[in-house]
Amino acid sequence: MKSIDIVVPAFNEEGCLEPFYERLRPVLDGLPYRFRVLIVDDGSDDHTPEVCERLVARDPRVGVLRLSRNFGHQAALTAGLDQAGADAVITMDADLQHPPEALPDFLNAWADGAELVSGVRASKQRARLFKRLTSLVFYKVLNLVSPVKITENAPDFRLLDQKVVRALRDLREQSRFLRGMYAWVGFRQVEVKYDEHLRTAGQSHYRNRDMFLFALSAVLSFSRAPLRLATLFGLLVSGLAFAFGVYALIQNLVFHEVIRGWTSLAVLLSFLSGVQLLTLGVLGEYLGQVLEETKRRPLYLVADARLPELHGSHRPNDDQERGDPG
Ligand code: UDP
Ligand code: MG
């Protein structure tokens, strides 16, 4: 029987985890796979750890990986993927926005040969209008500037074959945008539609500011277009400025009219300083990313782990090969 690891990042989900487990369990019980559920407690400061303990005590298939502090959604997912060792890994949110009932579709697509199955929100979305609009603009802009095609409306509800998981383990960038990384690794990808639901309890952890920073880091890590834009803009403005310089010289030398230029000077000056600051800002953003990457810090720290044994198949990064010979 093939094994499946379900990775569930959870940050302050005391109200969600139990309902989540209750809806997940019957789905798992009805499927012919050997499951493990790995909850990644991303430094919660509510009762999430206790809820996790209860679930671990109740069901031997459930394990928990506790990070030393809150490292963020993408890092928590990475931690889960690093621990997973099954034939395939499913990542899904703890707040039941990703319905467990969709899992059979994912697994069927995998059985049919897909190596990366992406859950795509069906058109009937229940998110707030503002979030829908910003998300639409985000994906359009991102795909305009990114060299790899990033699936729209596909959050981190995925099934990854172990080949894909292994490939992702080699991508250790700090500035992580997994959706882009899934697109970058390639493999045989298939989309599966699902109906998004409202969050079961609590609130989204992404405030508008976080969404903006997330979007910014996605663009910066997946495209050099803004840098090129800065260059193009610089070229354009320099060209215009040169033409204007010639014009001003002719005005001065041929027509001796010098006093009339104040407005144009003022406009030009402020425009040029604007462009210069913008360009510096773009450079600064990329420089900041380079700084973060050169530190080579771990993406997360594990405080403790209680993982169910994975029988049969062995973990790719396992110590087995390193064990005593014979
Ligand atoms: N999450 C996490 N660490 C964080 C923020 C969120 O592990 O710092 C988890 C959260 O518990 C949930 C998932 O990531 O399972 C998605 O987060 P959320 O529902 O807040 O985001 P939204 O669905 O609103 O985009
Ligand atoms: Mg959510």
Image: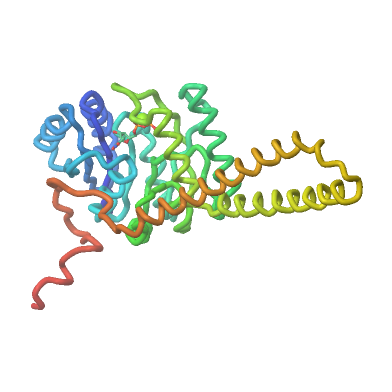
In the picture, measured across the screen, residue 120 lies left or right of residue 58, that is right
Viewer-proximal residue, 61 or 129? Answer: 129
Q: Quadrant of residue 255?
A: top right
Ligand 2 resides in the quarter of the picture at: top left
Q: Where does the image place residue 306, in percent across and percent down from the top left?
A: 12, 46
Q: Quadrant of residue 317?
A: bottom left
Looking at this rendering, what residue extends furthest in the bottom direction? 326
Tell me what residue is drawn at x 36 percent, y 56 percent.
Answer: 293
Q: Where does the image place residue 166, in percent across and percent down from the top left?
A: 33, 60
Tell me what residue is drawn at x 43 percent, y 34 percent.
Answer: 211
Tell me what residue is drawn at x 14 percent, y 33 percent.
Answer: 49
Q: Quadrant of the C terminus?
A: bottom left
Q: Is residue 77 visible?
A: yes
Q: Quadrant of residue 38?
A: top left
In the picture, measured across the screen, residue 78 lies left or right of residue 311, that is right
Tell me what residue is drawn at x 20 percent, y 26 percent.
Answer: 14
Q: Where does the image place residue 187, in percent across and percent down from the top left?
A: 46, 58
* Residue 267 drawn above or below residue 1: above
In the picture, measured across the screen, residue 243 lies left or right of residue 83, that is right
Viewer-proximal residue, 36 or 225? Answer: 225
* Residue 281 drawn above or below residue 291: above
The image's colouring method is rainbow
Q: Where does the image place residue 139, in percent across and percent down from the top left?
A: 54, 40
Q: Is residue 1 visible?
A: no
**How many numbered marks are there?**
0
